[in-house]
Image (cartoon, rainbow, N blue to C red):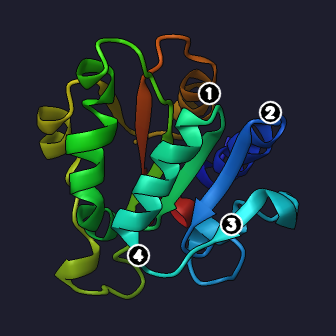
Amino acid sequence: MRYFDELKRSMNYLNEDPRVLFLGQAVACAGTAMFNTLADIPAERRLELPVTEELQMGMSTGLALDGKIPVSIFPRWNFLLLAVNQIVNHLDKIELMSEGGYRPKVIIRTGIGSERPLHPQQQHVGDFTDAFRLMCRNIDVVRLDEPEQIFPSYKHALERTDGKSTILVEWGDFYSEK
């Protein structure tokens, strides 16, 4: 069981659900290692977006409110920081603000940037898992440290019935190391 293979298997599994849509950066156009995990996903299920992280997260919440299950892809935590307002003040709080009337489910996929073989510098390798766990009361934040965690975590994120969203955190270095 390899880390990359489990990610690809998970994306293919998510794709089996007709409500799922993949959106974000390097979803339809190559540019990150995450792109390769979507190789078997049909183009019509992928929506490439420009570098507009807050807009992307707002769109993801809107799609979820419409009954879709967006897999919103932010290649690195450092990019996801630009969507904090939408995550912390909207997606995480919407069930509370609506007194249970709305429970949008978004699967957020992000990563801790790869440091090997080339270190891209500090603005690309942050791990904000613990900070987001503190900020988000209604979103599960799961760091995928081992290959055997990957498929069950993505499966749970899709199949959960509690209306919670999930942030799944991948390790860029593990794509080729584990």
Q: Check if mark 1's residue and mark 3's residue have beta carbons within 8 Å.
A: no
The correct choice, above or below, for 153 with respect to 38 in the image is: above
**N-terminal-most mark, 3 or 4:** 3
Q: In the figure, is residue 8 to the left or right of 70?
A: right
Mark 2 to mark 4: distance in Å?
26 Å
Question: Label for residue 17?
Answer: 2
Classed neighbour count for the residue bearing mark 3: other residues with Cα under 10 Å, few (<14), some (14–19), many (≥20)? some
Q: How many marks?
A: 4
**Of the residues shown, which amino acid type is indicated by label 1?**
Leu
Q: Which residue is mark 3?
A: 47
Q: Which residue is mark 4?
A: 52
Residue depicted at 85% across the width and 62% down the height:
44
Q: Check if mark 2's residue and mark 4's residue have beta carbons within 8 Å.
A: no
Q: Does the image show residue 171?
A: no
Q: Check if mark 3's residue and mark 4's residue have beta carbons within 8 Å.
A: no
The correct choice, above or below, for 72 with respect to 144 in the image is: below
**Of the residues shown, which amino acid type is indicated by label 2?**
Asp
| Quadrant of the rendered image containing residue 35 | bottom right
Viewer-nearest of labels 4 and 1? 4
Q: Does the image show residue 13?
A: yes
